[in-house]
Image: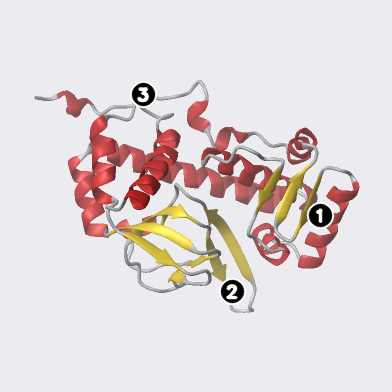
Amino acid sequence: MEAQEEAGLIALAEILLNKISGFFDVDDAVKATFAEICDDLQEFEAGTVIVPQGGDYGDVYLLERGWVMRSRHMENGARQIVNVVLPGDFVAMNALLFARSDFELSCKTDVSAYRLPSEKLGNALTRNAMLSAALFWVNAHEESLLAERIVSLGRRSARQRTAHVLCELVARLQITGVQSIEQLMLPISQEEFSDILGISIVHMNKTLRAFERDNILSFRNSILVIQNKGRLELEAGFDKGYIQFTRRNDRNSWRPNYLEIG
């Protein structure tokens, strides 16, 4: 493995292990297995469809760099972006369970991702119960994100939805190691934001302009400038516990009893 690729894997491991270590104590066996299965770094250009809607799943990927969109295209031409995959997240985890995808997974930016063949990953999971638990956490984490999106679409106003999704992205980017949150590059257009929030692009534009007039934030040319983070979180009713719920007092030092056998 080249030095640059090894450095990238170490950084990615730190992101992923930082997230799951809140759930249980990550042992050396998990780290070793993780390093073993991440040996095939793939590059994808922006716009590449990794898995088409209705297409066959292939392999699972672990995102090292870039942004991936998970979306559903409707018969009337509308699109709903379900979630955004960030570095340290898995892409196409459902390949372990299902043959075909109900969603499109496409690269919003240039992407680097470790290819994890389903059979190879499955074998690793059968050998290491703690790794299985780690992926169980990953699935629970994604479920929390999707559940919160349902709440936004069903019960929050356009202004609250916008504030909430921006707070969520900032919190998730902080997990990846982003330090400064006052000014962030978000490679998402207003049209894509409208497809995340389920509102028209005209409404999206008006909402962002209202935030700008209120000196809370500005979003232009994919640059998000947060002027008043406290006010933004208040507008959203944002509680990042659903993102980092393992950092709360309900932390569970789970370990399967059968690991002690022998």
Q: Residues within 10 Å of mark 1 (few under 14, many from 20)?
A: many
Lower sequence index among marks 1 and 2: 2
Query: How many numbered discs, if any?
Result: 3
Of circles 3 and 1, the one toward us is 1
Q: CA distance from mark 2 to mark 3?
A: 42 Å
Assign a secondary structure to mark 3. loop
Q: Position of residue 132 (x, y in %)?
A: 29, 41
- Tell us which disc is closer to us: 2 or 3: 3
Locate residue 19, reporting x and y percent.
45, 36
Residue nearest the viewer, comparing 5 with 202: 5
Work out how far the residue at label 1 is from the one at label 2, CA to CA, in angstroms.
26 Å
Q: Amino acid at mark 2?
A: Met
Assess disc 2: are there few (<14), some (14-19) or many (≥20) residues with their C-alpha within 10 Å of its C-alpha. Answer: few
Name which residue lies at 56% across and 56% down: 83
Kindly state the secondary structure of the residue where label 2 is placed: loop
Q: Nearer the viewer, mark 1 or mark 2?
A: 1
Q: Is residue 201 left or right of residue 109?
A: right
Q: Amino acid at mark 1?
A: Leu
Residue pointed to by mark 2: 74
Q: From this viewpoint, which residue is outermost toward the bottom? A: 76
**Residue at the top extreme?**
249
Q: Is residue 202 above or below residue 139?
A: below
Would you name the residue on which mark 3 appears?
A: 253
* Percent x, y of residue 180: 65, 39
Mark 3, other Cα within 10 Å: few <14 / some 14–19 / many ≥20: few
Task: Read off the residue under disc 1.
Answer: 208
Of labels 2 and 3, earlier in sequence is 2
Q: Is residue 97 visible?
A: no
Give above or below for 147 relative to 47. above
